[in-house]
Image: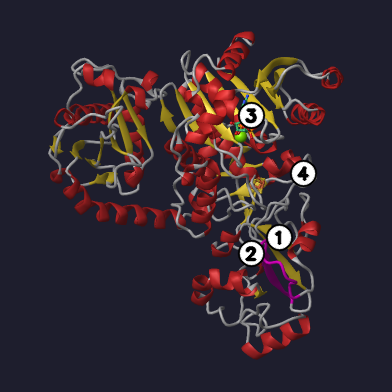
């Protein structure tokens, strides 16, 4: 494929690693304070097609890494600007991520990380073969982008090594990344066709599978939908796998045909229905790894939440560990839900049962940690903690006094 | 093929000393991944390397968990990939070998998922870097490292001092390790810091332990001097008894 380039290009180089002994120099990485890579979708007239611009000293101008003296680490910014009729903002992250693969496809180049952590290495052999300019890197990017992504109509690449300039541009890049993350946080179950499942905990909870969806983080809090997607890609037959979500059977309770099918299959027929958005009837199974427990309090017809770090007694007189013993083991238990803590931020958190507005008690620490969402929903002052009440009688009096919306009948259950 | 050598034994029996010498030796024949899996000691020091304490796998994982709970980790940066890249960043690269420090084992809480990601990361690391050898300086029973790697151990070296108690502990350890790991290749016992002959009582204990002695390492007079000067064990003279014995062990095992 190479032709006019000094080194070969192809997927066979993707697994190639450049260790210090073979290092010529590196850009970005842990030793460089300022670095980033950014793809931007622009309009066709904003781009000078196939232009490569280098700002700052080039490979040939810089001192290489020295075994005795060290050094050889330099700042870098890689800007890939693209345009095309079919391209929108959502494509930016995907295009940017290709920098990783494309760099690794070049013989003698190595790329790690992403965004403001980007890290590139060029090997001694590569330099010796004549790869002495970042311009060549830019030209290779353009070749690979245009040949592999036909959606790109115009492209220009800017590689910056001038630290002052990089520092100047970095805040903008960070803003773009933050905006992208914000969009990711608002990704909903409706937006995707694939959920993920995890059976890592089956060794001690044989009928448990965690269903991981954009609106549902795993019970242990360690795996979100994006993590599930990455893990399933690395090892599709492993304990974390893709679930075609199938048909939506109940939008309020969160029942999906694909999820039911996998539940039946992986729980060896013990369960064949799961509600992702309710703690009643067919709640999600609980293993033992959950970060918190949502538990029904019959006297209030509402829920309490308690997390693992809370060592005291909950308002119903039981501790987390006592409750955990009853909740774990991979069972579906009505009115008991082992959950990841971030689930409290999910718009679908027990939505069929009234959501956060059905919560009447939680430890003070949790209340502080989730103050922002609770305040937004006007619930911060309505939920009792261990400091407010000691038992259910006191809880009921508290709820009356503060006028908890669920107790006052102000919460409408969705239909 | 990557050969994995694990060195176990109770504290103070010379695991780190032997591991460091073996790593140095093997690094002349191929690329070595040195794994410091003993949270209580410091293989990096024995190898004469500086280690940044924030760069142990344990710390990386703690920091990841903290970032996640505080909402600082981007939701789109997948944890399996994040963990892998941080592990690569934490490698101390040296001539012929890289050092990876595992750090403290996990505290209470659920680590199923992060251990799964760790196992995958370590597998990928070994595959990408094409290590010829992995040498692990382990904590006593290897429970901690066992959860974080799925690699088969080709050679398990159990260290003991020349005491009956040491030998019976070594035998117990062998059983424990074989229970934890389905696949352990050759197991050998090394008796370290031997002065003179082994007593008949110890010989009897060894016979009863079912362990095969592959080396007796004498007390090395050069060690004290090195330690007094704070020099790494790898600076032992080539002809010192420890160096010679480690060479012999490697040859005997056809490493
Ligand atoms: N053969 C030997 N001769 C003299 N000193 C030794 C010998 N082997 C180990 N030592 C010393 O014993 C101490 C413990 O060794 P170390 O390798 O740190 O043990 P471990 O890693 O099993 O805890 C160290 O001070 C080391 O220098
Ligand atoms: S709790 Fe976590 S590790 Fe356990 S099965 Fe669920 S997702 Fe997997
Ligand atoms: Mg040690």
Crowding around mark 2 (Cα neighbors within 10 Å: few <14, some 14 to 19, many 20+) is: many
Quadrant containing ligand 1:
top right
Looking at the rendered structure, the secondary structure element under dot 3 is loop
**Residue position marked by numbered label 1 in the rendering:** A337
> Which residue: 71% across, 34% down?
B10
**Residue at mark 3: C-beta within 8 A of ligand 1:** yes
Along the viewing direction, whichever of A305 and B230 lies nearer the viewer:
B230
Q: Are marks 3 and 2 on the same chain?
A: no
Quadrant in the picture for residue A149: top left
Say whether disc 4 or disc 2 marks the residue closer to the N-terminus. Answer: 4
- Asked whether the residues under the numbered discs 4 and 1 touch, taking CB atoms below 8 Å apart as contact, a structural biologist would say no
Q: Are marks 4 and 1 on the same chain?
A: yes
Cα separation, mark 1 vs mark 2, equals 10 Å
**Residue position marked by numbered label 2 in the rendering:** A350
Looking at the rendered structure, the secondary structure element under dot 4 is loop
**Residue position marked by numbered label 4 in the rendering:** A204
**Residue position marked by numbered label 3 in the rendering:** B14
Of the residues tagged 1 and 2, which is closer to the observer?
1
Cα separation, mark 1 vs mark 3, equals 49 Å
Along the viewing direction, whichever of A102 and A289 lies nearer the viewer:
A289
Of the residues tagged 3 and 2, which is closer to the observer?
3
Label 2: chain? A
Instruction: Name above or below for residue A371 compared with residue A158.
Output: below
């Amino acid at each position: 494929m190479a032709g006019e380039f000094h080194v070969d290009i192809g997927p066979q180089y993707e697994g190639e690693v450049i260790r210090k002994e073979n290092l010529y120099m590196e850009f970005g990485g842990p030793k460089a304070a300022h670095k980033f890579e950014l793809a931007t979708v622009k309009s066709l007239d904003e781009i000078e097609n196939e232009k490569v611009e280098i700002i700052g000293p080039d490979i040939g101008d810089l001192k290489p890494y020295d075994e005795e003296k060290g050094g050889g680490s330099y700042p870098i910014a890689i800007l890939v600007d693209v345009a095309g009729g079919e391209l929108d903002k959502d494509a930016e992250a995907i295009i940017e991520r290709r920098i990783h693969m494309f760099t690794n496809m070049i013989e003698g180049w190595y790329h790690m990380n992403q965004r403001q952590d980007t890290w590139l290495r060029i090997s001694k052999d590569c330099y010796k073969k004549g790869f002495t300019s970042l311009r060549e890197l830019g030209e290779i990017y353009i070749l690979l982008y245009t040949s592999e992504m036909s959606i790109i109509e115009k492209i220009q690449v800017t590689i910056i090594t001038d630290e002052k300039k990089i520092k100047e541009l970095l805040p903008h890049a960070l803003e773009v990344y933050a905006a992208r993350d914000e969009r990711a946080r608002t990704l909903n179950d409706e937006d995707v066709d694939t959920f993920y499942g995890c059976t890592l905990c089956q060794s001690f909870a044989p009928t448990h599978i965690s269903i991981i969806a954009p609106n549902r983080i795993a019970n242990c809090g360690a795996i979100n939908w994006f993590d599930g997607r990455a893990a399933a890609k690395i090892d599709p037959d492993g304990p974390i796998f893709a679930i075609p979500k199938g048909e939506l059977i109940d939008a309020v309770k969160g029942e999906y045909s694909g999820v039911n099918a996998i539940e039946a299959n992986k729980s060896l027929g013990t369960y064949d229905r799961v509600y992702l958005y309710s703690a009643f009837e067919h709640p999600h199974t609980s293993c033992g790894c959950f970060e918190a427990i949502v538990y029904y309090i019959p006297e209030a017809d509402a829920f309490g939440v308690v997390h693992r770090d809370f060592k005291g007694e909950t308002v119903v007189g039981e501790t987390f560990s006592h409750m955990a013993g009853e909740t774990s083991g991979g069972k579906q238990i009505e009115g008991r839900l082992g959950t990841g803590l971030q689930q409290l931020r999910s718009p679908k958190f027990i939505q069929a049962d009234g959501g956060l507005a059905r919560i009447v008690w939680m430890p003070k620490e949790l209340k502080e940690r989730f103050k922002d969402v609770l305040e937004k929903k006007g619930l911060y002052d309505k939920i009792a903690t261990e400091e407010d009440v000691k038992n259910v009688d006191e809880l009921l009096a508290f709820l009356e006094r503060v006028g908890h919306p669920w107790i006052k009948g102000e919460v409408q259950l969705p239909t | 093929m990557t050969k994995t050598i694990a060195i176990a034994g109770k504290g103070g029996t010379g695991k780190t000393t032997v591991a460091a010498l073996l790593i140095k030796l093997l690094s002349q024949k191929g690329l070595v991944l040195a794994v410091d899996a003993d949270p209580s000691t410091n293989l990096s020091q024995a190898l004469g390397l500086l280690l940044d304490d924030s760069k142990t796998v344990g710390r990386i994982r703690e920091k990841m968990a903290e970032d996640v709970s505080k909402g600082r980790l981007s939701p789109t940066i997948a944890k399996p990939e994040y963990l892998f890249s941080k592990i690569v960043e934490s490698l101390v690269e040296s001539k012929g070998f890289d050092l990876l420090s595992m750090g403290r084992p996990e505290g209470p809480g659920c680590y199923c998922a992060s251990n799964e990601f760790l196992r995958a990361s370590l597998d990928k690391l070994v595959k990408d870097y094409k290590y010829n050898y992995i040498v692990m300086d382990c904590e006593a029973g290897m429970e901690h490292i066992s959860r974080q790697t799925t690699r088969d151990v080709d050679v398990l070296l159990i260290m003991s001092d020349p005491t009956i108690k040491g030998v019976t502990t070594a035998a117990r350890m062998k059983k424990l390790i074989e229970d934890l790991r389905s696949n352990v290749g050759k197991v050998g016992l090394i008796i370290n810091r031997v002065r003179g002959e082994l007593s008949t009582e110890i010989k009897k204990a060894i016979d009863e332990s079912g362990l095969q002695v592959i080396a007796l390492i004498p007390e090395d007079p050069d060690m004290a001097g090195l330690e007094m000067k704070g020099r790494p064990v790898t600076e032992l003279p080539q002809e010192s008894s420890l160096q010679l014995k480690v060479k012999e062990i490697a040859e005997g095992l056809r490493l």
